[in-house]
Amino acid sequence: MTLYIKNASFIDWQSLAFIQTNIEVRDGKDGGIKFIDEIELSADDTSKILDAKGKFVTKSFGCGHHHIYSTLARGMPAPAKNPQNFIEILKYVWWHLDKNLDLEMIKASALASALYCAKNGVTFVIDHHASPFAIEDCLFTIKEAFETVGLSHLLCYEISDRDGEKISQKGLEETKRYLSAGNQGHVGLHASFTVGKNLLRKAVKLAQDCETGIHIHAAEDKADQDHCLKHHHKRVIQRLFDAGGLDLKGSILGHCLHLDETEKKLLRDSKASWVVQNVESNLNNNVGLTGYSNHGDQIMLGTDGMHSDMLKSAKAAFFVGQGTEGISFPGIYERFRNVHKYIKDNDFKGDGDNNLVILDYPAPTKMNADNFLGHFVFGIESSHVDSVVSSGQLIVEEKKLVSANEEDILSFAKEMGTKLWGKLS
Ligand SMILES: [Zn+2]
């Protein structure tokens, strides 16, 4: 079925040109859009027509680094010990939570996160998942949940030696099974300090075999560098470079906060690797202020599982970036939109022109191509997301999820949250 959007003020996400038009939206991962003067439907045509009069239509958004596994954490009981540093935050909060996840909870987490993404205009999600005692089928479970809501995705399991070799082997097996089944995704690794020599070698080999990249947290906290220097006698980015991890197609390195100039040069020289920035998570974990003065151009934005709102991430990155790297309006907008470049350059599917968001943004001043970025930084928020089209399918209409039942998703998540919290305490 073709979808039409009439009376659109279309904002070209690249040129920022404003175009008054009607839009024909063709569905499918290879679908596109066409500007048309008139919408002419025969009497028996059941095509859907949305009226965007007074609203703005533009490309929908993508998240470069999410953790659906953290969805049920909101409001959970306090940890056994109040964490004093980053390693303790992992140990007492996140590793305690992810060890208690089962497949049902993972399904609920993925559905609820997908719901939030959809309602915030995010149609493409790159996720990094952990559930060491529920690895088998976890990626297939997340895929099914995302596709129920109608999101495109790149998934991975964050393989780690932190729970022993048997579990890291299971992570490799699930990844191989998922990617070999024709699914697009990455070979996920937790971070250098929980990935031993053998595992890194195997993961890079698996990524080479599957023609994809690794997705890993890198130098998020200084502790990752200290561990790498002590155990591998080199710094984190050097270690990944030496293992071949930076040459892989579309590797994603999360955070990259604590790099020296040699590591930054390795990143700049790598044509394949991307950095993903998660500024609110860095503030929350108190691991350092996020800034990328010399890391090259291949930087995109993620949420690190803090939330599913990329407009919020962009604003936070802009405000922190003022002090750390003097970021400009065009600079933050480019970083916000870089996820599309990442997806396109690496031939991943699901982010074509037929991914759109309709914004009901009652601007208090005029908005045009010349001043759009001022509205982007200070005005447009996810509360203005009215309707969302993912690969040509309408998934949110007038702020309501239409691809799946919103109430059912949230009540299932609450039920699974209660089950998880019972296991935590
Ligand atoms: Zn992360």
Image (cartoon, rainbow, N blue to C red):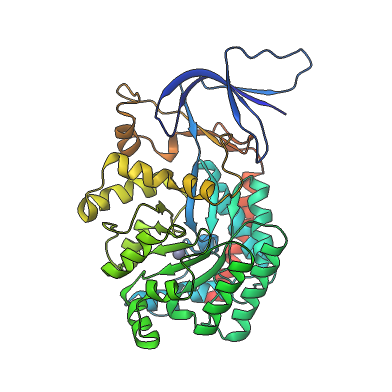
- For the residue pair 395 and 167, the one nearer the viewer reads as 167
Q: Quadrant of the N terminus?
A: top right
Left or right: where does residue 186 sit relative to residue 180?
A: left
- For the residue pair 182 and 46, the one nearer the viewer reads as 182
Q: Position of residue 89 (x, y in %)?
A: 39, 74
| Residue occupying the point 26% across, 43% down | 328
| Residue occupying the point 57% across, 62% down | 186
Q: Position of residue 46 (x, y in %)?
A: 74, 22
425 w.r.t. 211: above or below? below
Asked if residue 260 shows in the view, the reply is: yes
24 w.r.t. 385: above or below? above
Q: Position of residue 420 (x, y in %)?
A: 58, 69
- For the residue pair 230 and 95, the one nearer the viewer reads as 230
319 w.r.t. 238: above or below? above
Quadrant observed for ligand 1 in the rendered image? bottom left
Asked if residue 410 shows in the view, the reply is: no
| Residue occupying the point 58% across, 53% down | 112
